[in-house]
Each structure stands twice: as C-alpha cells, then as structure tokens.
Amino acid sequence: MHIPDGYLGPATCGLFYAIMLPIWAAASRIVKKTLNARQVPLLAIGAAFSFVIMMFNVPIPGGTTGHAVGAVLAAILLGPWAACIVVTVALVVQALLFGDGGITAIGANCFNMAFIEVFSGYYLYKLISGPSPFTSGRRVIAAGIAGYVAINVAAFSAAVMFGIQPLLHKTANGQSLYCPYGLNVAIPVMLGEHMLIFGWVEAMVTALVVKYLQKHDPSLLEAA
Amino acid sequence: MKTTTKLWIGLGILILLSPLGLILPEHFKAGDAWGEWGIDSIKELAGYIPQGLKNLSGIWSAPFPDYAFKGWETRGLPHLSLAYIISAVVGIAVIVAIVLFIGKILSKNGDK
C-alpha cells in the first residue's frame, strides 16, 4: 500500500500533503494537551512495531505481496491522534531511508495508513467494544474486526488514488502519464487482495496483541 | 518485568524474524506489491512506460533501497536477510529517536 514516486500526479500528491498538514498540526496540538512523559516510550514502541510489522511481506503464491500495518493496534493503545503521529514517523522513515513509498506520495500514504486506517479502526473498535470490560473477549473480537475493516478502507482509498490517475493525466495518444491502471482495475485488485489475505493478517496481529495485553497488563488498554 | 520491557523484547524477536518477509515471497514466487512495480515490470504489465512515472520515479535515492545495501541486489538470500535485519535495526533506531524527540517536545512534564 506504499505508493511509490511516479504513480500519482502532482495534483494528487499536492492535495494529500495539503490535507495532511492540518491533520498533523491538530494531532500535535491534541497530543500535547494530554501526553504524559511516562507514555512516550509506549509511543516509540508503537512506531517501531508498525515499522517492523510492515517488513513482514506476506506472499500470495505466484502473485503479489502485502503486509499488515499495525495502525489499528497503535490507535487502540495510544489513541487515534498519537497513533497518527507515530505511524507518520514510521512511513516517513520508510520513504526516506528505504525508498518504501515515494517522497512525493508521503502525504497520500500518510492519509491512507496514518489517518484513514487509524481513525476508522479506532472508532470501529470503540463501537464494537461498547462498555465491555477491558479484559473482555469482546474487545479481542472488536480489535480483529477493526483491523480487518480499517486496512481494507485504507486499501480502497489507495486504490482510488491509483485509479483516478488515468482520468486526470493522459497523453495525446491515450497513454496514462502516471499510474497506468484505472479504477476498474485498481479497486477490485487492491480491495480483493486485502479482503482475502492481508486484512486477515492485520486482524490477527491486532487481536493477538490486544489479547496478550489483556492477560499481562490490561492497564495499557485503558489509556486511550 | 515491566510490560514495556517485554514489548521491547518482542520487537527484538520480530526484528530477528523479519527476513521471513523476504524469504516467504521468494519461496512462493510472489512479486512486488500491486502498484509498487519498478519501471521494467511496468513496461511488461501495461505495455508501455508512463512518461510522468518515468520522470518522477527516480526523484529520490534512498540510502538503503528495499531494505538492502546498494550493490547487494544480486547477492543471495542469506546476504539479503542480513541486510534486512540491519535495516530493521537502523530503521527502528531512527524511529525511536524521532518519537522520543517529538515526545519530549509534546509531553507536559518532559523537561522535569
């Protein structure tokens, strides 16, 4: 889901930087109000976890690869605004140091994984958990469903970004200037592979860590 | 043991296991993620190289492209796995440093 340089035209890249700037500003303002120095190591762990879990490429035999993002887990543990910041840090480092995701697409990739996935996952988790105790099995299920749905929402958003490029930028002879595939290809492929495989990976990662924390230190689930 | 300590240990284990993310796709002959192909693969898939994509694709030259070292592309899986682990360590070190710095600025009692 890390859109590389060259797949999105300047208009799309610029738009999503413009959308993310106020979101990043709001995130810093909101986190600043509530963040306690004792919670900072947990933020670092959340960012590091998201980074390393994205290195576990899961193959579709003979096809493509994909991976979990860990963004919903970060949101459950840290709250959505802090999660937005830490997933952004992971994505920026991936782009700058490892060429994973383009530097022109940092706004777009952060919109998908650090904003859309984080917030949709967080609120879905809250909604399904309801008033259940922090150690209840319902929260494990809620975490799994939130992970599954939220990564698919993010994949859909990425697919739309890819898919609108042929509509926006074409040469005189009909060739696309940037991503060569339209919505009719991008949406079924991106959503299909995430619904079939990668969504389940995100669901498992999110649910298992929540289950582990319920057993060992449920107080961490109460913070956000 | 503090939970955060346990989580750091968990991260260490994930770092050591990370080459699975390299070896499994290779074993199952899975290629690039959809929409993350290089120029050569695009030409094969779409039948042409989109001009704007070609111009923009080389705009940034990452120091550790694809979690490996430059010039190691043709080395075997053991070398690439080692580079993958080193990349994970470097990436996490940089990320932790940045988040601790941001945390220091944003946290209420960060300077006490």
Image (cartoon, rainbow, N blue to C red):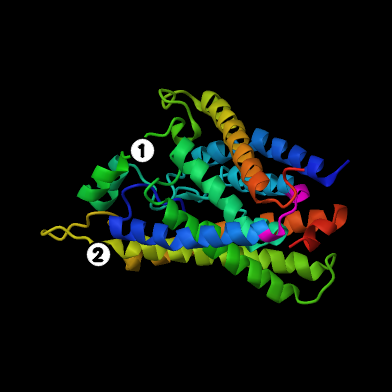
Chain ID, mark 2: A
Residue bounds of the magenta highlight: A33-39
Identify the element where label 2 is drawn: helix
Whether residue A194 is visible to the viewer of this picture, yes or no, is: no
Q: Are marks 1 and 2 on the same chain?
A: no
What residue is shown with label 1? B60
Q: What's the residue type where badge 1 is placed?
A: Trp
Q: Nearer the viewer, residue A211 or A116?
A: A116
Q: Nearer the viewer, residue A33 or A135?
A: A33
Looking at the picture, how far across and down is residue A24, in whole percent? Answer: 52, 57
| B49 sits left or right of A213 in the view | left
Q: Give the quarter of the image for residue A79.
A: bottom right
- Residue that sits furthest to the front in the current view: B112
Looking at the picture, how far across and down is residue A60, in whole percent? Answer: 50, 51
Q: Is residue B44 above or below residue A125?
A: above
How much space separates mark 1 and mark 2, taking CA atoms?
24 Å
| Residue that appears at 68% across and 69% down | A125
Please tell me whether residue A9 belongs to the stretch shown in magenta.
Answer: no
Q: Give the quarter of the image for residue B98.
A: top right
